[in-house]
């Protein structure tokens, strides 16, 4: 083989190697760009998730505070209901005693009226 043919083969091999490297390098660059886009997209989703988590955390805190407030109100209402039940029982007892007393007084009044009628001259 002649020296020129060997040099030509070496040059062709070098050119093919260079072209293969450039193709491989371009493919690697495309993959890096794709990964950067995917990373950016995931970061945006993550940031949206953080915002949503904050929003839900605030809502959860608000709901917990509201639940505690309602629990306190329910306890207060239960105490008041018990107090009203005691007062109602006391009033019912007083009503019964007043009714009994009224009955006794009515009987006494009727008795006195009868006695007054019997003493009437006539």
Image (cartoon, rainbow, N blue to C red):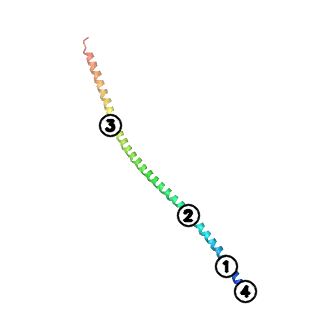
Q: Residue at x 45, y 54 (%)?
A: 58
Q: Give the residue number, with chain letter if any, for mark 2.
A: 40
Mark before the other along the chain sequence, 2 or 3: 2
Q: CA distance from mark 4 to mark 2?
A: 53 Å
Taking 44 as reference, is 26 left or right? right
Q: Give the residue number, with chain letter if any, for mark 4.
A: 4
Instruction: Categorize mark 3 by other alpha carbons within 10 Å: few (<14), some (14-19), many (20+).
Output: few
Mark before the other along the chain sequence, 4 or 2: 4
The label nearer to you, 1 versus 2, is: 1
User: Circle 4 sits in a helix, a strand or a loop, which is it?
Assistant: helix
| Residue lying furthest right | 1
The label nearer to you, 3 versus 4, is: 4
Q: Are marks 2 and 3 in contact (CB under 8 Å)?
A: no
Image coords of residue 86 (percent x, y): 34, 39
User: Circle 2 sits in a helix, a strand or a loop, which is it?
Assistant: helix
Q: Give the residue number, with chain letter if any, for mark 3.
A: 90
Q: CA distance from mark 1 to mark 2?
A: 34 Å
Q: Give the residue number, with chain letter if any, for mark 1.
A: 17
| Label number found at residue 122 | none
Q: Residue at x 67, y 79 (%)?
A: 17
User: Circle 1 sits in a helix, a strand or a loop, which is it?
Assistant: helix
Q: Residue at x 67, y 81 (%)?
A: 14
Mark before the other along the chain sequence, 1 or 3: 1
The label nearer to you, 4 versus 1, is: 4
Assign the N terminus to one quadrant of the image. Answer: bottom right
């Amino acid at each position: 083989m002649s020296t020129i043919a060997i040099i030509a083969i070496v040059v062709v091999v070098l050119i093919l190697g260079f072209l293969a490297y450039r193709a491989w390098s371009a493919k690697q660059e495309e993959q890096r760009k794709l990964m950067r886009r995917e990373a950016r997209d995931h970061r945006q989703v993550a940031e949206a998730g953080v915002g949503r988590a904050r929003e839900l955390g605030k809502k959860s805190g608000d709901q917990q505070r509201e639940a505690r407030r309602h629990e306190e109100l329910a306890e207060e209402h239960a105490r008041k209901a018990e107090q009203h039940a005691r007062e109602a029982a006391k009033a019912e007892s007083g009503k019964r005693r007043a009714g009994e007393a009224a009955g006794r007084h009515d009987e006494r009044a009727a008795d006195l009226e009868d006695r007054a009628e019997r003493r009437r001259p006539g």
